[in-house]
Amino acid sequence: MSNIAQKIAERLNLGVRQVEKTIELIEQGATVPFIARYRKEATGALNEVQITAIRDLLLKAKEIEKRREAILQSIGEQGKLTAELEKAIREAETMTDLEDLYLPYKPKRKTRASVAVEKGLEPLANELMRQYDGDVDQLALRFVNTDKGVASVEEALAGARDIIAERVSENVQARNKIRNLFRRTALLSSKVVKNKEEEAGKFKSWFDWEENAMRAPSHRILAMFRGEAEGMLRVKIAPADDAAAFEMLERQFVRGAYDSSKQVQAAVRDGYKRLLAPSMETEYYNLLKEKADKEAIRVFAENLRQLLLASPLGQKRILAIDPGFRTGCKTVCLDAQGQLLHNETIYPFTSVREERAAVAKLEALVEAFQIEAIAIGNGTAGRETEEVVKKCRFKRKLIAVMVSENGASVYSASEVAREEFPEYDVTVRGAVSIGRRLMDPLSELVKIDPKSIGVGQYQHDVDQRMLHDSLNDVVVSCVNSVGVELNTASKELLSYVSGIGPVLAKKIVDYRNKNGAFTSRQQLHEVERLGDKAFEQCAGFLRVRESENPLDRSAVHPERYALVEQMARQAGTTVEGLMKDKGLRQRVDINAFVSDDCGLPTLQDIMKELERPGLDPRTRFEVFEFDPNVTRIEDLQEGMVLPGIVTNITAFGAFVDVGVHQDGLVHISQLANRRVADPNEVVHLHQHVHVKVIEVDLKRNRISLSMKNVK
């Protein structure tokens, strides 16, 4: 393991001791949030990103080790494992190096070379590889054998060339040379499939495209690969021409200008064209796909993080509306804890009379349920519903907010929603979800598969396991950075808390339902199957607001409670007094409490928590309003400057909702007055921005926007 730690440390430019301690904690079952928050002394205060990178590289290293042992066993069972080969396999550092070494020994289906070997032509191939000056026809004549299926000299030579071609394609040096050639010069090209021009319209930009493969941006790679998967494009990855490849390989394998050398030369060219080049094309296809997947997933993950950490309105009594023209607007009233109090449907768009009735009904519901805010879904009929709400004359001051509906339909039809509201249909559940998103986006969105939230590009094209793992890391990170109220959290939210998971989350909720609210963190020990390790991992991220111990309301870990009590005694007060009085906290000399397992980083974290216990890291909620004069795409005119909300961020720009039921694109070149490499440098999800309309394409329903020189 020390060798693995050394390599990971070099790769990440970290100290070996830091990596070793992090690996040790991971192997003991510690989670990334726990290590980052509560084991800073052990890791040298590594952050979540660094710890996650160590974890991922550790998993890869283990996969390589597992594959290494399987390869050694396979070659050993064949009786072909020499000391030199074993040394090379033991020293191989990447999966690619391992597979190259294994390739000649890998059991494979019948090939032209294996058929030739069965026909007894391997000795002929060996003789040709010697490249002596002699008559190759006379040499080959000795291997003509109709019983073995070799009817002529040419058939014998062709079979020998097949054997040589396969050897060329499996040679480690040759593969590395061609691999490097592809890396330097390979072109990624695409052409439209014949007679698919009309059907493949959405891929028109790539009907005749060519660029350097390794410099191609992720979104373009994924677009071309999707076009190929749908049968609309033909995609190729290859050097501009084969001359350089032939020259490299011939320099390695061809010696002299004898007839036998010409046979080897022909075999080398065949080996490259038929075996090695396609193999490298597949390898680089996978490499480009992995690179594009990683970038697309990175963007998706960053968007998801911003969405989950969007500003919460907080515990307010909400009236939520899921808008609809023909089917009406499903309207629900929620209490401050998000519990459903009332639901009905209003039909403001069927007639003037129904609109008046809808206005009267909304006014009555707001008064009856003491509503403090109105949440309106931003989908079909959203802006129109907002206009209806503006016609209401409420007797109380409240705000009306447009809320993203992305994923609401997925939630409403899910098992989670059916379990929460078994007696209500999907429309009611969807409206409830819209209302709860306004109160606390994080608590509601964790109930939905992150892929369904709609803040990524090509999420169905990328590696699904990699996507799942990355998005799960984001959700875990967000949930634990905010903290979870133990007595109100759903089992879905609890399942993302460090050390808990779905099974323990259900056990916690079952315990809560049976015994009432938790009165302290220590009471978690009474939950079935929640042992000491799980308690260690989760306790610091759970809050118990009604606990008698004020530290249960903070992010101070229970393992440090005794330490805080010592601090309070030093200051001549109680823990609660220490938390309430800044002057008392200033009396504490934290240097006096430094120990082997509790250094200044942890002590500084404790003091911050005592000052602002359980502080929510999310920003304060701000009300946003669209331009009231713009509700349809037809209302847009070039040059207009409008308020908007960033709804999605991609590698090529940001999408902004300006309130016309169709998001506009701010291309990366239009995001700022300076050159931007990553849109996340300039904007974040749900950011309130002002944009200028630079083009409206009504036919294609596309809006082009700019943030340059816009105030």
Image: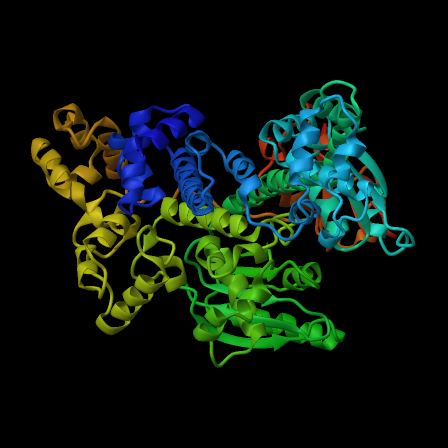
Of the pair 266 and 119, the residue shown nearer to us: 119
Is residue 349 toward the left or the right of residue 532 in the image? right
In depth, the one of 476 and 339 nearer the eye is: 476
Q: Nearer the viewer, residue 117 or 330?
A: 117
The image shows residue 679 at horizontal and vertical percentages of 63, 34
Is residue 236 in sight in this rendering?
no
Determine whether 116 is above or below 348 in the image.
above
Tell me if 308 is positioned left or right of 677 in this view. Answer: left
Q: In which quarter of the image is residue 129?
A: top right
Number of numbered markers? 0
In the image, taking residue 332 as reference, residue 564 lies left or right, namely: left
The image shows residue 709, relative to residue 278, as above or below, that is: above
Rendered view: 154 above or below 500: above
Viewed as shown, does residue 426 lie left or right of 147? left
Image coordinates of residue 444 in percent, x first then y, are 47, 59
Q: Which colour scheme is used?
A: rainbow
Residue 286 in the image: state x and y as whole percent. Answer: 63, 42
Q: Is the N terminus in the top left, top right, bottom left or bottom right quadrant?
A: top left
- Residue 66 seen in the current view: yes
Name the residue furthest top: 256
Report x, y in % for residue 473: 44, 47
What residue is shown at x 68% (from left), y 35% (from top)?
A: 125
Identify the residue at image location x=53%, y=44%.
301
The quarter in which the C terminus is drawn is: top right
Query: What residue do we see at 62% from left, 38% from top?
Result: 287
517 or 207, nearer to the observer: 207
Res 132 quadrant in image: top right
